[in-house]
Image (cartoon, coloured by chain):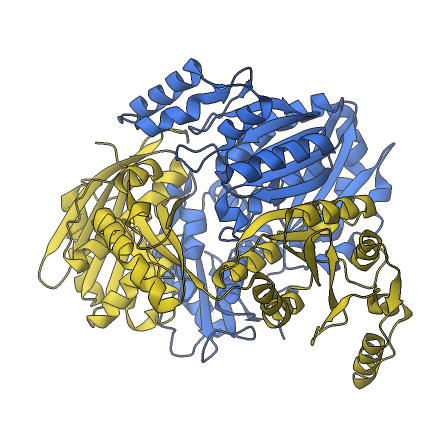
Chain colours: A blue, B yellow
Amino acid sequence: MRVEILCTGDEILTGKTINTNYSHIARRLAEVGLDVHWGTTVGDDRTSLLAAFRQAGERADAVIVNGGLGPTVDDLSQEVAAEACGVPLVLSEYWMQRMTESYARRGRVMPVNNKKQAMLPEGAEFIDNPIGTACGFAVTIGKARFLFTPGVPREMRRMLDEQVIPRLLKLGGITGVTRLKRFHTFGIGESRADEMLAGIPGLAIDGEIKLGFQAHYPQLETKLAARGADADDLLRKLAPAEAEVRRRLGNFVVAEDEQTLEGVLLAKLGAGGYTLSVAETFTSGTIAARIASLPGAETVFKRGTISRALPADGASKEAAAKLATELRAESGASHGLAVLMQLDEGADRPDFGATIAIGIADPATAVARQARLVGGRDWVRIGAAELGLDCLRRHLLGLPVDERIDFERR
Amino acid sequence: MRVEILCTGDEILTGKTINTNYSHIARRLAEVGLDVHWGTTVGDDRTSLLAAFRQAGERADAVIVNGGLGPTVDDLSQEVAAEACGVPLVLSEYWMQRMTESYARRGRVMPVNNKKQAMLPEGAEFIDNPIGTACGFAVTIGKARFLFTPGVPREMRRMLDEQVIPRLLKLGGITGVTRLKRFHTFGIGESRADEMLAGIPGLAIDGEIKLGFQAHYPQLETKLAARGADADDLLRKLAPAEAEVRRRLGNFVVAEDEQTLEGVLLAKLGAGGYTLSVAETFTSGTIAARIASLPGAETVFKRGTISRALPADGASKEAAAKLATELRAESGASHGLAVLMQLDEGADRPDFGATIAIGIADPATAVARQARLVGGRDWVRIGAAELGLDCLRRHLLGLPVDERIDFERR
């Protein structure tokens, strides 16, 4: 089945917004076994939209359209879809009511403009949006089925998984189930992970495993995708490969699937009946923010402190261990984490770096580690926060806190 | 002049690589007054490439092609361009020599594969690449001039500025300039802003103004775009519309153009010789992180504290004002900002909410404000952080801290 993605909107066309919706949609489709053959971007312009719909309708079997479902005059997707189909727009009483109720629940009156979002091409298939005012819809133009989704990423992502992909799989006559197993690592780059996992696709039983990587610094995501007759069959087929990936990536795996590093940490602290206090310098609260905002953190997270001033002896291992020890004593937490950074002098630049010292104290001991990261202010700040959290994870799991990471310069 | 961008490569088509080349090219073109009318993405596939070249050649006056100039077999741009032009590929002796010399200077022998990069469609215009082995070229397909650029961002960016844009401006006979004016607001939704700014495009002098919005919660971006003979002419034409937008959006404008709310705050605090300490509960460090990580914050940001425990009287105005006052006294800062949140009970859900109390203390006074936000844990946390920063901005500028925002439920 030939699938295309058609992104609309001046923001995307003019490059003001980087088109991450496109890459998200394309990746998700690949994960369920659907290949994207063509991508088109046009602006909020009637003539271009109509031409793009017609051309895609000649080439493709299915087209995912993203954007142009908002309440303002420059949102044209419904109108142009109706024109391409040669039908009028008609009011969806159902969606009008849903929107009105949604506003009412929040104690607000729906603006008049929003009525536009309930106008759909006559005969269009309704596609639900459970979390927004832009509903989706599907129509046929030329030989292709067009599925319209909103540009708001959160809404698009949910509708893609719950509404669009099931329809596409049905259209393409694709049966069976797919499974995507994900491993999140910190500390190894994509080329090293690729080397570490040589031969993994060959471990599948009766079928094919697709191995892929997605680098989103500071983490790397390793994905195993496979298809099977049913869920049990698929689990059985994937099991040996999953186990082998877990073994080879080893201590660098910080989380799997929907887990996050901070979620794993919070669960581990909570299970041990522990509490945590965090002291930060240039990471400026980003470490505390990752943990303290999580559901359930109120019983674990004791105190966070942020300053821009370093101890007298700078970002040394001794200073970090001392600060972590003092912090846990003062705050009454069972565990203290201190992340100190000594920034390079001067302006931001690609070889701007920092020396990072991490200290962890618990009732029995205090450990520390030092590292040097290079790559610009934001890069080192993000890396330092991750390194701090990962050291705490390693300490709690009894793994070496001092294992070299690929981003480190020694 | 109709310009299109055509991006090639499986990495881009499948979403594995986010297409930042596209947005860079489109933004740079807009900055010099060239509008992109259409974007196409195809993979390393002969049939798709040929069809894409032919279709763009029918629609556009100029097409920037990105990618497919590398030395490997899946790099097909020269071959397919030659096919579309109906000419053979011929060796550029000049480029062959340049590549050979470049390798020799680094003490290496050029791999045989690289010869492919010197094969250009017969009669093509050579476009220099001063920093790589993939030279560019230009040919005419249909009614459009096609300019080919490499996918390596560093090489593409330099060639775009030095080689491609001058050719496009000449092709288009363009002498004027464009301007994009941006206003960043907090507290009004897109539909309300649209209503507030009715009639703005009509305020242009001798020309057209395009009004657009981009919502990225919690902020809304309002954009005015226009074109003029030169920079002075354009400023004069846009001035009345700019002033009117600024007046109508009023107190909700937190920043303009490249400014950020936190940058505006830091500058205002710095200019007054002030220092700031921040106390947070469920925003968990995200407020401190926005300010304390900025260059120059080390002289302004005194201390951040994060806890998950609320004062005994909860998220009341009194508690927030008291905490802000104590914080500034204890930390020695001139200003204290406290943001308290009382979360709803239970699991995350779309109508999950929180009561937020914000306290601000300075040497002369203490003010406070309370608000209720609804929309899920992350939504209220992000909204509360923005509200805290915005209240401090309003206080420093002498604006009312208590003005109702659209996200608020009373």
Say whether residue B103 is visible. yes
Residue A387 x/y as whole percent: 54, 60
Using the image, determine if residue A197 lies above or below residue B275.
above
**Quick check: A29 left or right of A173?**
left
Q: Residue at x 67, y 52 (%)?
A: B6
Residue A255 image-quadrant placement:
top right
In the depicted structure, whether residue B177 falls above or below residue A52: below
Q: Closer to the camera, A206 or A124?
A: A124
* Image-quadrant location for residue A92: top left
Q: Is residue B344 above or below residue B45?
A: above
Horizontal and vertical percent position of residue B258: 38, 61
Residue placed most toward the observer, A275 or A42: A42
Q: If the image is split into quadrants, where does the C terminus of chain A sit?
A: bottom right
Residue A373, quarter of the rendered image: bottom right
Q: Residue at x 77, y 31 (%)?
A: A227
Q: Quadrant of the N terminus of chain A?
A: top right
Where in the figure is residue A299, as x and y percent of width and height? 38, 41
Between residue B301 and residue A302, name the one nearer to us: B301
From this view, report whether residue B398 is shown above or below residue B401. Answer: below
The location of residue A190, given as percent across then percent down, is: 70, 57
Is B125 displayed left or right of A403 in the figure? right
